[in-house]
Image: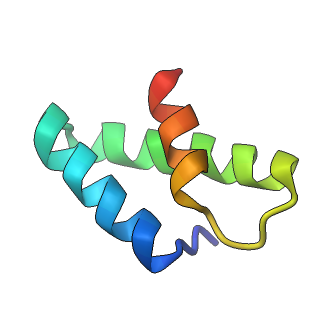
């Protein structure tokens, strides 16, 4: 369900390591990113969707 662009995959890995997220935090960011991507009309989760989700 949560398919990411290559850039988004790299970005979320960096965030995961930098913020030392748990797997629970990682999945919560993915879920919020999927919602943001849907609202923006994106088929795949993009880097900007993840950045916005992390801001929340």
Q: Is residue 42 left or right of residue 30?
A: right
Q: Quadrant of residue 11?
A: bottom left
From what the image shows, is residue 21 above or below residue 16? above
From what the image shows, is residue 45 above or below residue 23? below
Q: Residue at x 66, y 53 (%)?
A: 34
The quarter in which the N terminus is drawn is bottom right
Q: Is residue 48 left or right of residue 9?
A: right
From what the image shows, is residue 20 above or below residue 44? above
Residue 40, percent from left and from top: 83, 50
Residue 36, percent from left and from top: 72, 43
Q: Residue furthest top?
A: 56
Q: Residue at x 51, y 56 (%)?
A: 47
Residue 31, percent from left and from top: 58, 47
Q: Residue at x 17, y 33 (%)?
A: 19
Tell me, what colour scheme is on the image? rainbow
Residue 23, percent from left and from top: 26, 48
Q: Residue at x 52, y 75 (%)?
A: 5
Q: Is residue 40 left or right of residue 27?
A: right
The number of discs equals 0
Q: Quadrant of residue 41?
A: bottom right
């Amino acid at each position: 369900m949560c398919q990411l662009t290559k850039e988004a995959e790299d970005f979320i890995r960096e965030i995961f390591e930098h913020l030392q997220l748990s797997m629970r935090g990682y999945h919560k960011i993915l879920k919020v990113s999927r919602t943001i991507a849907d609202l923006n009309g994106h088929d795949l989760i993009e880097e900007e969707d993840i950045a916005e989700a992390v801001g929340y």
